[in-house]
Amino acid sequence: MIVLKRLLFGSVLMALGASGAVAQEVLLTLTGAVADGEVKLTRADLDALEWHEIATSTSVTDGQPVFRGVLMRDILDRAQASGDTVTARALNDYVIEIPMDDFHEFDVIAALYMDGIALTPRDKGPVWIVYPRDDHSVLADIRYDMRWVWQLSALHVQ
Ligand SMILES: Nc1nc2c(c(=O)[nH]1)N[C@H]1C(S)=C(S)[C@@H](COP(=O)(O)O)O[C@H]1N2
Ligand SMILES: [Mo]
């Protein structure tokens, strides 16, 4: 896992032309046991966190794409989340419960890029939960594959 310098990422963003409007778009809504019961995170909020990369095989792609995003535990910390379970919901209303422990045991990321290309809602974006599957043999399992929520839009903490 490579920690990217925030500065470097900022300049890449500018090169891609991410405008102020995009930066203010809400990508994730956290509810339940979070600060004030609801936290809405914009692209700018995520850009303020440390970015990470994971190169891993997946159950739905060929090869080992490189995913880039922010750690799920950093997102949860940012929202002052406390609890045992995170219920993840996607744009297509897929819902699954994920044990909070996953995010402390493993460097799971909320990915916004795959192989340097921004994920879009048409292609598993804008946010896709990605586990470091190739780094831990236990993760190559259907129980974990189910937690790779694509088109992630909301997290409910309890
Ligand atoms: N948004 C969303 N994410 C999802 C799903 C889904 O239906 N919608 N299916 C899950 C399940 S059950 C699995 S096993 C993995 C891999 O899905 P696939 O092999 O059916 O493509 O993605 C997970 N993420
Ligand atoms: Mo599945």
Image (cartoon, grey):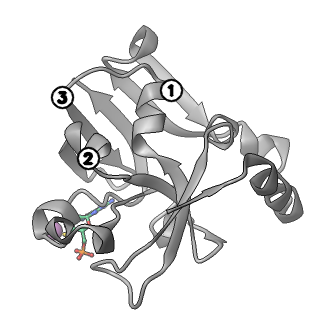
Examine the rendering and report whether any part of residue 126 can be seen: no
Q: Amino acid at mark 2?
A: Glu
Which numbered disc flags the more N-terminal residue, 2 or 1?
1
Q: Residues within 10 Å of mark 3 (few under 14, many from 20)?
A: few
Give ligand 2's quarter of the image: bottom left
- Which one is in front in this view, the residue at disc 2 or the one at disc 3? 2
Left or right side of 117 for 28: left
Left or right side of 97 for 114: right
Using the image, determine if residue 36 lies above or below residue 76: above
Judging by the rendered image, the residue that carries numbered circle 2 is 105
Judging by the rendered image, the residue that carries numbered circle 1 is 78
Residue 98 is situated, as x and y percent measured from the top left of the image, at 20, 44
Mark number displayed over residue 84: 3
Question: Which SS class for mark 1?
Answer: helix
The answer for how far apart the CA atoms under marks 2 and 1 are is: 18 Å
Residue drawn at (24%, 46%) of the image: 102
Q: Quadrant of the C terminus?
A: top left
Residue drawn at (11%, 61%) of the image: 143
Mark 1 within 8 Å of ligand 1, using the beta carbon: no
Which numbered disc flags the more N-terminal residue, 2 or 3?
3
